[in-house]
Image (spheres, helix red, strand yellow):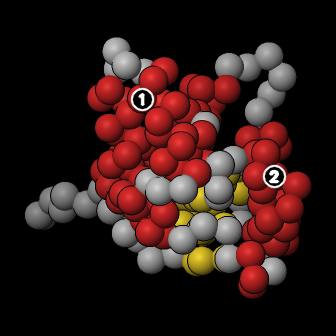
Amino acid sequence: MASSASSTPTIWTHDAFLSFRGEDTRTSFTDHLYLALIQKGIRTFRDEENLKRGKSIGPVLLKAIEESRFAVVILSEDYASSGWCLDELAHIIVECKKEKEREIFPVFYHIKPSEVRNQTGNFSQAFAKHEENFKGNMEKVDKWRKALGEIADIRGWVLDKDSQ
């Protein structure tokens, strides 16, 4: 009897992981998207819903990314000003590339993919601050830039201010 080298199917804790800048979209677009996903039976991780009080945010969010079948990244005007959002995005890009069955769905909320790709506008201002704050760790800033460039090259949804 021949043995097959089949891999065991992955059991996901979450279907979707939502990555977003809370101040930009938490009480508007992200809330609506989250509720729509839940109503469709899609198990969705969103930081305020799934984090227990007293737990460190970092490891919990990174674990949730690793345990999610796909990620929806809502890139908004001030997304790049949050080092945490950028760390999350870099982790999503690495994890999804590692496992081919995982997907990333970008949503460009009130920004153009080219602003993300080229880090112009608010993204340029945010990176000027990051470069100042992380002078001794430019690898981190470069990793963030690369992650933004990669996600901007994924076909996603562009929701400009006029489409609302």
- Any part of residue 104 in sight: no
Q: Position of residue 71 (x, y in %)?
A: 55, 58
- Return the residue at label 2: 26
Closer to the observer: label 1 or label 2?
A: 1
Tell which residue pokes out farthest to the left in this image. 2
C-alpha span from label 1 to label 2: 27 Å
Disc 2 residue crowd, few under 14, some 14–19, many 20+, Cα 10 Å: some
Q: Secondary structure at mark 1?
A: helix
> Which kind of residue does numbered mark 1 sit on?
Glu
Task: Please say if the residues under marks 1 and 2 sit with CB atoms less than 8 Å apart.
Answer: no
Tell which residue pokes out farthest to the right in this image. 27
Disc 1 residue crowd, few under 14, some 14–19, many 20+, Cα 10 Å: some
> Which kind of residue does numbered mark 2 sit on?
Arg
User: Is residue 87 or residue 109 the one in the foreground?
Assistant: 109
Residue, x 47% and y 56% (percent of image)? 120
Q: Is residue 9 above or below residue 63?
A: below
Q: Is residue 159 above or below residue 79?
A: below
Q: Position of residue 111 (x, y in %)?
A: 60, 67
Q: Position of residue 19 (x, y in %)?
A: 63, 51
User: Is residue 135 or residue 57 the one in the foreground?
Assistant: 135
Q: Secondary structure at mark 2?
A: helix
Residue 140: name its quadrant: top left
Residue, x 77% and y 33% (percent of image)? 51
Residue, x 12% and y 64% (percent of image)? 1
Q: Earlier in the sequence, mark 1 or mark 2?
A: 2
Q: Is residue 136 above or below residue 37?
A: above
Q: Position of residue 59 (x, y in %)?
A: 57, 26
Residue 37: name its quadrant: bottom right
Disc on res. 131:
1
Q: Quadrant of the C terminus?
A: bottom right
Residue, x 65% and y 49% (percent of image)? 78
Disc on res. 157:
none
